[in-house]
Amino acid sequence: MRLSVAIDGPAGAGKSTIAKLIAKKFDLMYINTGAMYRAVTLTALINNISSKDTEALCNLIDTMDMNFKNDRLILNGKDIEDEITHPNISKNVSEFAALPEVRQRLVKLQQDMSKQYDVIMDGRDIGTVVLKSSPFKFFLTASPSERAKRRYIELTNKGLSVEYEDILKDILKRDHLDTTRDLDPLKKAEDAIEIDTTGLNIDGVVNKISQYIKI
Ligand code: DC
């Protein structure tokens, strides 16, 4: 049996930062499932495929070879991490991530990865759907203002010119879309451990999670 760790929570709760550190500590492959939904969104936008054209979207996904190298998403051999974190993708991704046909395909790819490697995955439906039987599930939260502040710092550090208020608005909108969609909405798995990261430093969260992972 492969080892798997599931981390869920809303945008900006610190999932990817924490998951990357836990991956190093326990020698796991880090799978950023949000990046996979972003990659579908980016590719659909580039190819002018609307979220309503599910047939074209499914055909598109079938041509996408996604894997992770050094925590970064490689699509058909190309590192697209910078493109998929652009605010324009953040604005559009929830619409594509809500489509059953898209979710079905990406969940299958993620489950296949978890059979091949020891993984830590972060997302919205990891503990409830993708890695339902994982023994190590965590649900990270933080206040919306703290999450917007973190995203603002992350994006400005990358040299992007963004407004804090726009980021906060986008986060609140995505929270609403992600938690109210019909299929696999963001929700804590019953057996997940909830950690509120507001005001906690990164090491504190990593240590807390590490205490629960027994290998
Ligand atoms: O974690 P993120 O902000 O990169 O995620 C991008 C979007 O993808 C987010 O709005 C919700 C969606 N998502 C999802 O529906 N299921 C996942 N497992 C991961 C992300």
Image: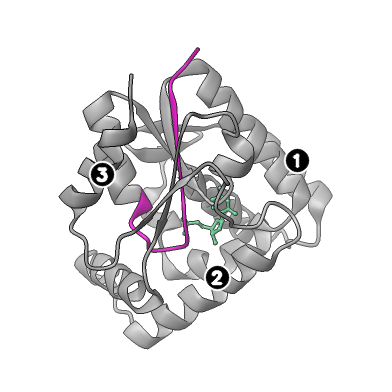
- The residue sitting at 53% across, 45% down in the picture is 36
Q: In the image, is residue 38 part of the stretch drawn in magenta?
A: no
- The residue sitting at 71% across, 47% down in the picture is 102
Disc 3: CA contacts within 10 A as few (<14), some (14-19) or many (>=20)? few
> Which of label 1 and label 3 is nearer to you?
3
Whether residues under marks 1 and 3 lie with C-beta atoms below 8 angstroms apart, the answer is no
In the image, which residues are magenta?
1-15
Residue 88: horizontal and vertical position, in percent? 49, 70
- Tell me the CA gap for discs 1 and 3: 42 Å
Please say if 2 is above or below 40. Answer: above
Residue 151: horizontal and vertical position, in percent? 32, 68
Q: In the image, is residue 12 part of the stretch drawn in magenta?
A: yes
> Which of label 2 and label 1 is nearer to you?
2
Residue situated furthest bottom in the rendering: 165
Q: Which mark is residue 59?
A: 1
Q: Nearer the viewer, residue 152 or 40?
A: 152
Disc 2 marks a residue whose amino acid type is: Arg
Disc 1 marks a residue whose amino acid type is: Asn
Q: Which residue is mark 3?
A: 208
Dot 1 or dot 3: first in sequence order is 1
Q: Nearer the viewer, residue 19 or 193?
A: 193
Q: Which mark is residue 174?
A: 2
- The residue sitting at 57% across, 46% down in the picture is 190
